[in-house]
Image (tube, helix red, strand yellow):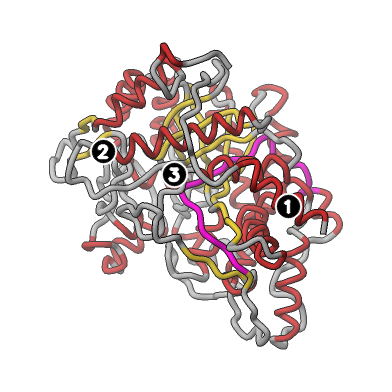
Amino acid sequence: MWKIELLIYSLVIVGTSCSSVNNKKFPDSFLLGTATAAYQIEGAWNEDGKGENIWDRTCHSDPTRIFNNENADIACDSYHKYKEDVALLKDLGVSVYRFSISWSRILPTGYLNEINQLGINYYKNLISELKANNIEPLVTIFHWDLPQPLQDIGGFPNDRIIRRYVEYARVVFDNFGDDVKYWITFNEPKQTCRGGYAALGDAPFINSSGIGEYLCTHNLLKAHAETYHMYNKEFRDKQNGHIGITIDTVWAEPDSKDKADVEAADRLIQFTYGWYAHPVTHGDYPEVMKQFVGERSAKQGFSESRLPKFSKAEIHGMKNTVDFLGLNYYTSVMAKHKNDEEKTAIDWDQDSEVDTYFKPEWPSTASSWLKIVPWGMRKILNWVNKNYEGLPIIVTENGVSENGTTLEDDVRIDYYRDHLSGVRDALDDGVNVIGYTAWSMMDNFEWTRGYSEKFGLYSVDFNDPERKRTPKKSVSFFKQFLATRCLVEESKCVAA
């Protein structure tokens, strides 16, 4: 009971609204920048030896899955325009740039039998350009774009993926590790596993609900842990880098102060963020996940839990395999306990037994899943800090969409200001948050939504063969913020 009372108390002291913008400077050491992903911006889908990945296959073989039958064959053409992009980042004033490496550009078949030097050269040149402009690379090793040959043998639910990923990561560390100090093994693994193997929201669009997402996660986490140990053994003494994983989650606000609803809200976050963060910190899945999935599996007639079990050796090897945690936060939900006595649904979304909804007064965006709830930022940062013993946290994605009809994106300015204020509030709370990279540097290919949803600071004209970049109004705001590290007028800003 005391845990529930403590959680309710924490909700009260953190508050439920952004009443004012924090006027304290961000520390000089705090990493500030923007983020992108390879498949969403690079284009050059089949140039210079790059192999086919699962999103290439989807866009070309089943284009109806993508809004307006669009694809990322050219996207923002950053493969050819990376110097222009770095110049924009330099002008913006970022201290860090988060981008991802395309597995298929490095290993066209997904295997070590073919290493593509031209692909390696591209990332070497990009990193060199960033370093020459005093911008720290924050590199994601895998951001959803699995090589198609590896999907052809089952993808992440096949445990052969573990060794393939470690081999790929070794090539990445060997070629780029001397110049990269911050690594992210996986971006939003919940979307890779839940979206790709259960919910039909992401490539490879396989429906194995209630089973596939758990098998995918189990192997992905093992791949992460083995990569961490491989880095420690082979590279850390020389390269001195930091290894993390980026996990997306909502903040879940209890529908009421009733114990059942407060527990349900926490349980939902355990089923999202905890699903991945708990194993890499504590060695195993959250107890509440093991309990709920196990009980439901038994009632459904399974001989064992649909949530796989780690062996004692795997638990030992999984524990403490991150140097920092990445957090992608965009929105919040209201959460209430779901009375599910039958427990018939075989699905991750039902296993948590939580009902969620948006409050009608929360502002909408161009994305149906994204309501503007800035006070959730401070709360989720406090939750992560409390549950994972003060590990360093980097907010690796945070942003808002609009439809691209105007460059006067005041909604984005307000969104960034209010969410960054929540980050600064969290610093005041003692949360060990060390960086923030806004999503996104520029409009890009937003997966199944194609080019219909715009998250960029810079507009990209996808009808122009040159893919012209044009600053939106938010660039001026972000540039001023990065220069002063203040969210208010500099004369009203106080030292940290």
Q: Residue at x 75, y 78 (%)?
A: 295
* Residue that mark 1 sits on: 279
**Which residues lie in the magenta part?**
317-336
Going by the numbered disc 1, the residue's amino acid type is Pro
N-terminal of the two: label 1 or label 2? 1
Q: Quadrant of the C terminus?
A: top right
**Residue type at the position of mark 2:** Asp
The residue singled out by tag 2 in the image is 409
Q: Specify whether 133 is left or right of 138.
A: left
Q: Left or right: 169 with respect to 263? A: left
Residue on which the image places disc 3: 102
Q: Secondary structure at mark 3?
A: loop
Relative to 184, does residue 46 appear above or below in the rendering?
below
Q: Nearer the viewer, mark 1 or mark 3?
A: 1
* 23 vs 181, nearest the viewer: 23
Residue drawn at x 40%, y 27% is 126
* Residue 63 in view, yes or no: yes
Tell me: residue 491, above or below residue 255. above
> On the image, which quarter does residue 256 sit in?
bottom right
Residue 159 in sight:
no
Disc 1 versus disc 3: distance between alpha carbons? 26 Å
User: Which percent across, then down, holds residue 36?
Assistant: 40, 39
Proximity of marks 2 and 3: CB atoms separated by less than 8 Å: no
Please give the name of the residue rendered at 37% of the width and 47% of the height, measured from the top-left corner.
39
Most extreme residue toward the left is 464
Residue visible at 34% across and 60% down in the picture? 448
